[in-house]
Image: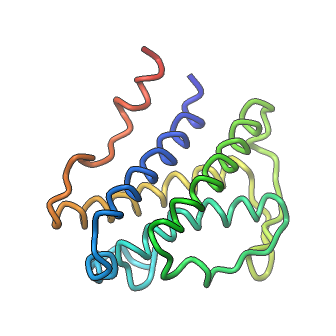
Amino acid sequence: MDLMTRMIEHHVWLTSELLERAGRLTDEQLDARIEVPIGTIDDDMSIRSVLGRLVGQLAQWNAAVTQRSYDWDQERGKSVSTLRRELAEEGPTFLAQVRATVEEGRLDDTFVDVTCDPPRVFTYGGMIAHVLTFAAVRRLVVLGAYETLGITDLDAGDPMEWVAGAAS
């Protein structure tokens, strides 16, 4: 099993499931402030803004590895249907890039991230680890907010059984 790729597959799948459940919520529920003391991971968190960042994070890194600029402001205030459409494009693109990088043994290779000001150099492996780490936090924030609204069918979004499912 290629665990790194499998974890990215889980991330894209779970983000899609979070968006599906977000479609059941009102604008008031989507935009209600989430009070979680997580430091500086995101400002003014709401279900909508955190979901926007989950999808935006994939779009941002897709732009970074292809040396394109990224408009950070475009992540805020999007409808759930827009986020679903964007995930349907950005998720598979990111996943394909991860698969190729892993299969070609290029996790230690570097790229220049022009989405930063000033541009910075990162490794592909470091970028993937960053995505998995911060996406996990954001997913848990949304899952916690869902729990307060009575949406509990995704539990904690634990990848253990989902990842193992491919091996059985």
Q: Please indicate whether residue 92 sits to the left or right of residue 132 in the image.
A: right
Q: Residue at x 37, y 79 (%)?
A: 45
Q: Residue at x 60, y 62 (%)?
A: 86
In the depicted view, which residue is nearer to us: 109 or 72? 72
Q: Residue at x 52, y 48 (%)?
A: 12
Q: In which quadrant of the rendered view does residue 37 lie?
A: bottom left
Q: In which quadrant of the rendered view does residue 104 lie?
A: top right
Q: Please indicate whether residue 116 sits to the left or right of residue 111 in the image.
A: left
Q: Residue at x 56, y 77 (%)?
A: 75
Provide residue 40's location: percent of width, then percent of height: 45, 79
* Whether residue 157 is situated above or below residue 55 in the rendered picture: above
Provide residue 162's location: percent of width, then percent of height: 39, 32
* Whether residue 123 is situated above or below residue 69 in the rendered picture: above
In the depicted view, which residue is nearer to us: 130 or 86? 86
State which quarter of the image contains the C terminus: top left
Q: Please indicate whether residue 126 sits to the left or right of residue 1 in the image.
A: right
Q: Please indicate whether residue 153 sits to the left or right of residue 43 in the image.
A: left
* Whether residue 108 is situated above or below residue 166 in the rendered picture: below
Provide residue 106's location: percent of width, then percent of height: 79, 39
